Every structure is written in structure tokens, then in C-alpha cells.
């Protein structure tokens, strides 16, 4: 019995095993058959999100599927997507966040449609030696701190000084806001009571101070630039406004990379307005806390630009110093890679006096303008290219761009990683692959956005002055939260330790 019972179990289980194996065999055979005969169908059913995956992993696939879908204007999109791929190729550590920018065609226009209240700014009445005094202005009669801009506006020195002149334009704009008929047309207004202000503005013309006064005169121990910085730190840290916030709600302008060299180490809780972060430790200045402002271009704007792809004969234009220290080695390498190309123009030396006219002509008659990192990640060349409607080709891995939260630079710039740019023929092939339609689209976008990089007095809606104020205003809520947060333990923790917590740990501090 036991034996018979046992054998029936064995027979039964053998049968089951046989059936299962057969099923497995048949289904796998079917699988092979179907996947060879109808690959597309099978792929789709197995991976319903295949298209999504391709879009996120492979820019090339996206470009081909897009040009299928929109054959009418797909080709320029395909070019953009290709650039995107070039930008992403190799490392892949960046999430494909730009994807959003392609759909959001009006991304740049959002910043124009602001009908919000202007930012309320309190400005310290600093001694004129910190601002207009540096321009040679002297208080006229009385003890006035500020020039009466309704009668005469002191002028800022020209030449290369101008590229860092944001300090001048922002200060003028605040002064002008007091005489404004319609404050709601402004991005920022001056308030006299600091308790009512969103932010506190420090009107020190630090770039001019660096450019003009950082040499030591024989009879001085310290140069004037250093003396002013030390004085400023002493003044600020003694103010009730600074003590109230630990400086977090203060706006300090330091556009020249070497300006505020001493004071930045004491004033860093403040929001800096900078050209880039190249010479700053990350805990002293970073994208979260600070604002990047454009350089004022030194090349003439291209008014009534009627050029087109064919009339701009030079393919690629570069003007600048070549043998640079620090990050600048790429310039030299690129020069050797590109010097054999007939329609590539490389010229050396900085843009000054006579050079401005030549560079203007050069940029106005080129399709693409190279921006290669020099001894800092940024330079005024990018803004010269924008003003010339010469599509910028940016080779600067560490560059940070003004108002990038509201402006999608990939619509009018081409980004190339330094490691890619230094590959034989990579850059030339890339640039040559962009045809008339794709180029024209970027050229049109450049003409659309150029006003966002224009400094002027009085400021106009959407110009550089107002765009900077708006970028500052977007940081204001986070500043207020940081201040409120820093008060959490103010009863139990010594004052001086307050507020270090939200800033990245000092990995490369000093
Ligand atoms: C591009 O395609 C969009 C939507 O398909 C269409 O509205 C637009 O007019 C097209 N532009 C050109 C230049 O063909
Ligand atoms: C400044 O504003 C605060 C809050 O609105 C108010 O309490 C204070 O009296 C004002 N100070 C002056 C000098 O008007
Ligand atoms: C540009 O065109 C406008 C309108 O046609 C004209 O008034 C202006 O003078 C031109 N500007 C230049 C610099 O050519
Ligand atoms: C911070 O606290 C003040 C009250 O002192 C409050 O008015 C303000 O809304 C708070 N800020 C934020 C961002 O919560």
C-alpha cells in the first residue's frame, strides 16, 4: 500500500514536472518567434515607458522622434536636442532638467509679466567716500550724502571699468525710486524705515574701489580699497539692522572677482551680487544665497540688425587673452585645434579703445562667438556676444549665469564641456552641424532677450537693472525664513553661533 501510494505520487509529480517543462518550452519558443517577427510590438508591450526612457537617456533618439512628429519645424529642435546631448554626454550626473525649458517656450517672458509689488529696500546713508565720492563727486553745500540726481548724475568711468558697474546702476535706481510717479513700474523702491524693508542695501562701489584704489601709495601703509573695506565691516556690524539679522538680509555688491577680497570673509552671511563664484569658497558664496549679475557689455549693441546666417561670414569668433593662468589653459589648446580653419577667427589681446570697434565688427559679422573660461569662469565676452546677436558657444564648466531660474540659456547659447571641446574636430563639427534654420531661431531669441542684459538710467521694465532686482526679490522669502529659523534657539545658544547651520559645511574654508 505504502509503496503503491508512493509510486502514484511520484508518477503524478513527474507528470506535473513534464507539463510545466513543456509549457515553459512552448512559451519561450513563442517568445522568440514573436520577438523576431514583430519586434516593435513586443518592445512596446514589454516596456510601455520605452519612449520616456529614451527621451531621458538619449538625446539623439529624442531628436529623431521629434523630427518625425513635427517635420515642419522639427529640424531646429533636433539641433537643440543634439546640443543638449553634447552637453550631457559623458558624465550624466545632471538630471535632464532642461527638458522642461523646451516645452516652456515662454519661460523668458514670464519675468516680464510681473505686476507684483516692488521690492522694498532700505539703503544705508553711507559716507560718499564709499560710493559717489569714488567718482569724484563732492557733497554740494550742506551735509548731503547723495547727489541730487534730478539736476546732475555723476558719471562712472568708462572703458573696462564699466563691465562691473552694476553698483552704480542699482544705486541710481534706488535713488530714482523716490522721485518716481509710478512706483509700481519699478522692481525695487527705497524705503526710509528699515523695519519696513524686505532687504537692506549696502551702497559700496566695491568694483570701482578695487579698480581705482588697490595700489598702495608711497605715503600709505594700506591701500584705500583695503581701508574702505575694513571701515565698512566696522560700520555694518555695528548697525542694528545687521545685528537683527546677522547680516542675512543685507545686499552686498562685489561684481569684480577681486572686489571685497578682505570684507567678504566677514560679510558672507549677506547676499552677494557677483559675476561668478570662481574665487569664492562655497560657504562664503553659492547659488542658494547669492545672485549672479551680468557684466555690462563693452561692445556696441547691434541696433537694427538685418544680418542673417549667410551675411555673417565668420563661422566662429574669439577675442581675448590667450595664455591665461588657472582655468585658462583650454584657450591655448583650442587655438591649436582651430587655427587651421579658414572661417574661424581667433584674435588676442583685450578689448580696449580701438579694439572695441574691431571686436564689434567681428562679432556683428560672425555666426557664433566663443566664450572660453579664462582665469575666472565668466567674462564680459558672453554679454558682448548677446549684444551682437552672435550665438554664444560657452566652454566653461563652472559658469553660473544671470537669472537662470527664469531664462533658458539653451535656447540661445550652445554649451560644450571643456573635455569635449578639446577633442579633435569636435567643436568645429558641432558648430558646422547647425544649419540656417536652427541658427536663425537662436539669433531671434537673442534679439528677444538682449534687453535683459542692458543697463541704463532710468531703468526700464525687463532691463538688467530690473532683472537683477527681481532675482534679488526671489531670494527674499528664503532670507526671511533663514532669519526666523535662526531665532529658534536664540534663548539658549550664544549669539555668535547663530545662523551657520543653513550654509554648506566649510569644506574649503580658507
Ligand atoms: C512649429 O510647430 C508649432 C506647433 O506644431 C506651430 O504652432 C508653429 O507655427 C511651427 N513653427 C514654424 C516656424 O513652423
Ligand atoms: C518704522 O516702522 C516700524 C514698523 O512699522 C514702526 O514701529 C516704527 O515706528 C517706524 N519708525 C519710524 C522712525 O518711523
Ligand atoms: C533703427 O531703425 C529705426 C526705425 O527704422 C530708426 O529710427 C533708427 O534710427 C535706426 N537706428 C540705427 C542706429 O540705425
Ligand atoms: C518671520 O517672522 C515675522 C514675524 O517676526 C513674520 O512676519 C514673517 O512672515 C516671518 N517670515 C517667514 C518667511 O515666515
Image (cartoon, rainbow, N blue to C red):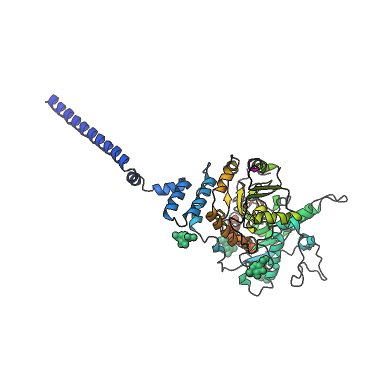
Residue at coordinates 64% horizontally, 60% vertically from top-left?
453
Q: In this view, does 30 lie above or below 53?
A: above
Whether residue 476 is visible here, answered yes or no, is no
Q: Is residue 29 above or below residue 371?
A: above
Residue at coordinates 46% horizontally, 48% vertically from top-left?
56
Residue at coordinates 74% horizontally, 65% vertically from top-left?
125
Residue 100 position within the rendered picture, expressed as x and y whole percent measured from the top left: 49, 55
Q: In this view, does 305 lie above or below 373?
A: below
In front: 4, or 29?
29
In front: 47, or 30?
30
State the quadrant of the C terminus. top right
Query: Is residue 100 toward the left or the right of residue 168 in the image?
Result: left
State the quadrant of the N terminus. top left
Residue 414 drawn in magenta: no
As drawn, the residue found furthest toward the right would be 219
Magenta part of the chain: 336-342
Whether residue 463 is visible here, answered yes or no, is yes
As drawn, the residue found furthest toward the bottom would be 181
Residue 106 position within the rendered picture, expressed as x and y whole percent measured from the top left: 52, 61
In front: 378, or 343?
343
Residue 217 position within the rendered picture, expressed as x and y whole percent measured from the top left: 85, 51
> Which image quarter: residue 463?
bottom right
Residue 324 position within the rendered picture, expressed as x and y whole percent measured from the top left: 71, 43
- Count numbered badges in the picture: 0
Amino acid at each position: 500500500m505504502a509503496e503503491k501510494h508512493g509510486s502514484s505520487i511520484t508518477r503524478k509529480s513527474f507528470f506535473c514536472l513534464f507539463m510545466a517543462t513543456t509549457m515553459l518550452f512552448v512559451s519561450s519558443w513563442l517568445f522568440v518567434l514573436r520577438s523576431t517577427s514583430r519586434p516593435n510590438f513586443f518592445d512596446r508591450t514589454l516596456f510601455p515607458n520605452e519612449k520616456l526612457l529614451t527621451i531621458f537617456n538619449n538625446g539623439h533618439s529624442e531628436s529623431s522622434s521629434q523630427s518625425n512628429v513635427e517635420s515642419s519645424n522639427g529640424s531646429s529642435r533636433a539641433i537643440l536636442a543634439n546640443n543638449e546631448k553634447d552637453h550631457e554626454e559623458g558624465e550624466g550626473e545632471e538630471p535632464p532638467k532642461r527638458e522642461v525649458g523646451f516645452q516652456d517656450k515662454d519661460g523668458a517672458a514670464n519675468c516680464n509679466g510681473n505686476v507684483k509689488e516692488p521690492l522694498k529696500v532700505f539703503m544705508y546713508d553711507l559716507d560718499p567716500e564709499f560710493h559717489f565720492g569714488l567718482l569724484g563727486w563732492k557733497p554740494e553745500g550742506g551735509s548731503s550724502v547723495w547727489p541730487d540726481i534730478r539736476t546732475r548724475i555723476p558719471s562712472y568711468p568708462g572703458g573696462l571699468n564699466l563691465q562691473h558697474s552694476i553698483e552704480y546702476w542699482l544705486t541710481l535706481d534706488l535713488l530714482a525710486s523716490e522721485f518716481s510717479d509710478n512706483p509700481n513700474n519699478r522692481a525695487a523702491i527705497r524705503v526710509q524705515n528699515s523695519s519696513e524693508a524686505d532687504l537692506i542695501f549696502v551702497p559700496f562701489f566695491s568694483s570701482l574701489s578695487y579698480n581705482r584704489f588697490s595700489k598702495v601709495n608711497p605715503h600709505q601703509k594700506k591701500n584705500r580699497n583695503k581701508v574702505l573695506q575694513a571701515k565698512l565691516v566696522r560700520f555694518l556690524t555695528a548697525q542694528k539692522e545687521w545685528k537683527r539679522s546677522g547680516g542675512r538680509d543685507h545686499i552686498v555688491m562685489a561684481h569684480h572677482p577681486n572686489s571685497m577680497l578682505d570684507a567678504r570673509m566677514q560679510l558672507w552671511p549677506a547676499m552677494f551680487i557677483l559675476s561668478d563664484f570662481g574665487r569664492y569658497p562655497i560657504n562664503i558664496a553659492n547659488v542658494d544665497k547669492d545672485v549672479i549679475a551680468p557684466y555690462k557689455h563693452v561692445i556696441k549693441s547691434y541696433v537694427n540688425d538685418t544680418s542673417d546666417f549667410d551675411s555673417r561670414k565668420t563661422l566662429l569668433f574669439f577675442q581675448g587673452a590667450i595664455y591665461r593662468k588657472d582655468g585658462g589653459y583650454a584657450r591655448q589648446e583650442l587655438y591649436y585645434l582651430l587655427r587651421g580653419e579658414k572661417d574661424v577667427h581667433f584674435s588676442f589681446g583685450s578689448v580696449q579703445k580701438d579694439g572695441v570697434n574691431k571686436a564689434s565688427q567681428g562679432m556683428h559679422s560672425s555666426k557664433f562667438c566663443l566664450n572660453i573660461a579664462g582665469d575666472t569662469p565668466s567674462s564680459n565676452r558672453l554679454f558682448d556676444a548677446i549684444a551682437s546677436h552672435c550665438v554664444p558657444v560657452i566652454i566653461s564648466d563652472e559658469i553660473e549665469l544671470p537669472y537662470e531660474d527664469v531664462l533658458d540659456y539653451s535656447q540661445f547659447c550652445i554649451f560644450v564641456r571643456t573635455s569635449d571641446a578639446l577633442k579633435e574636430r569636435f567643436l568645429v563639427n558641432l558648430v558646422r552641424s547647425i544649419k540656417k534654420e536652427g541658427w536663425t531661431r537662436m539669433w531671434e531669441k537673442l534679439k528677444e532677450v538682449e534687453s535683459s542684459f542692458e543697463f541704463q538710467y532710468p531703468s526700464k521694465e525687463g532691463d538688467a537693472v530690473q532683472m537683477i532686482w527681481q532675482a534679488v526679490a526671489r531670494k527674499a522669502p528664503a532670507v526671511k525664513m533663514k532669519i526666523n529659523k535662526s531665532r529658534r534657539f536664540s534663548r539658549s545658544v550664544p549669539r555668535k553661533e547663530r545662523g551657520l547651520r543653513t550654509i554648506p559645511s566649510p569644506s574649503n574654508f580658507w
